Amino acid sequence: MRCAAVAVVAGAMAVSLAACGSAKESDGGSSKSAGSEKKGDAIKVGLLLPENQTARYEKFDRPLIEKKIAELTNNKGKVVYANAKQDATLQSQQVETMITNKVDVLILDAVDAAAIKSSVQKAKDAGIPVVAYDRLAQGPIDAYTSFDNVTVGKTQGEALLKALGDKAKSGKIVMMNGSSTDPNAAQFKQGAHEVLDGKVNIGKEYDTKEWKPENANSNMEGAISALGKKNIVGVYSANDGMAGGIITALKAAGIKVPVTGQDAELAGVQRIVAGEQYMSVYKPYAPEADAAAEMAVALAQGKSLDSIAKDKVDSPTTKNVPSILVAVTSLTQDNIQDTVVKDGVYTVADICTAQYKKACDKLGLK
């Protein structure tokens, strides 16, 4: 799955994600796990994912990471998995359980990047290195992999401007950002604003609690009521799940405008085919998952990350974290065949169900 995706790790894309950390945690980018002994392939990897509402985590991230760890350890490595279901307190408890179970390394996708800081410190104190996955958790993490999140936001903003054309300032746009507890959401928003500010009129802007589609739907209904349905010309949505809730509200009000997205979820791709959603950001999960697995296995085995992680990023607490950043692609009707279909994420049959067959035929998806 996605094995054809190009794992572009661009040094030029390495962005400093925050300013200096404290002296105590100023160099979390240790290349080896603290005090770890050299281990063989029989390692235990703790995998903590943040939620199960977004399709990617159970459909892509978990199986891809498990598969890569098996490959790297000759099927001797064990993955211990837990999903926090968007509950930061539960995730902290899950870290404690992983420490009790004496995992050799943690791969952590934080529900709340700041709230997890003390748990990361506890893992570090127990000699368990932590790989921050997809979201840059605070605390003394040892490695990080994600996408260039500011570039994701810029990609969304540029696509929205293209869709709006000369109508960009003819009305108002609504910005539906992600959760305020997710540092990625702030970076998506930053990138989008860098592109959109001064070129559109932002009528309403929201940070959407827990990234939930139903919250985006409620926010969109509020925006329509406040701005008037004739005055809305486009919507910046930070991901596909929220785009679904937004489009439901737009349809109910009889509004059809360009809407962005992210993650190339199947439902999002189908909405793009149908012309309901303008674009998504295709993030090839295989190279991200592979990077996390490679760094985790190396750390668990007490090996250096120097040959694996070529980039460095800073969190609010930790400087110079060894990192791998993966490139993204703007997904529209024009390149569905050459991205998610070509890379084996979805088959044409997956996308072109009876409801979408006519639209697929029109696009030449067969």
Image (cartoon, helix red, strand yellow):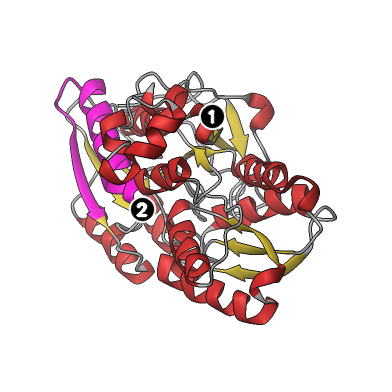
Badge nearest the viewer, 2 or 1: 1
Specify whether residue 295 is in view: no
Q: Earlier in the sequence, mark 2 or mark 1?
A: 2
- Please, what is the three-letter code of the amino acid marked with disc 1? Asp
Crowding at label 1, few (<14), some or many (≥20) Cα neighbours within 10 Å?
Answer: few
88 or 271, nearer to the observer: 271
Q: Are marks 2 and 1 in contact (CB under 8 Å)?
A: no
Residue 222 appears in view: yes
Q: Is residue 31 left or right of residue 45?
A: right
Which of the image's four quarters has the C terminus?
top left
- The residue that mark 2 highlights is 123
Estimate the x, y position of residue 204 in percent, counting from the top left.
68, 71
What residue lies at 49% left-to-right and 68% top-to-bottom? 216
Dot 2 alpha-carbon crowd within 10 angstroms: few under 14, some 14 to 19, many 20 or more: many
Please state the horizontal and vertical placement of residue 335, each as a whole percent of the image.
Answer: 51, 27
Which stretch appears magenta? 55-82
Secondary structure beneath disc 2? helix
Q: Secondary structure at mark 1?
A: helix
Main SS class of the magenta portion in the image: helix
| 143 relative to 227 in the view: left or right | left
Cα separation between marks 2 and 1: 46 Å
| Residue topped by disc 1 | 334
Tell me where residue 32 sits by quadrant.
top left
User: Compared with residue 85, is residue 279 higher up or lower down, i.e. above or below?
Assistant: above
- Asked if the stretch drawn in magenta spans residue 56, the answer is yes
Q: Is residue 304 above or below residue 164?
A: above
Q: Residue at x 47, y 43 (%)?
A: 272
Q: Compared to 71, does 79 lie above or below?
A: below
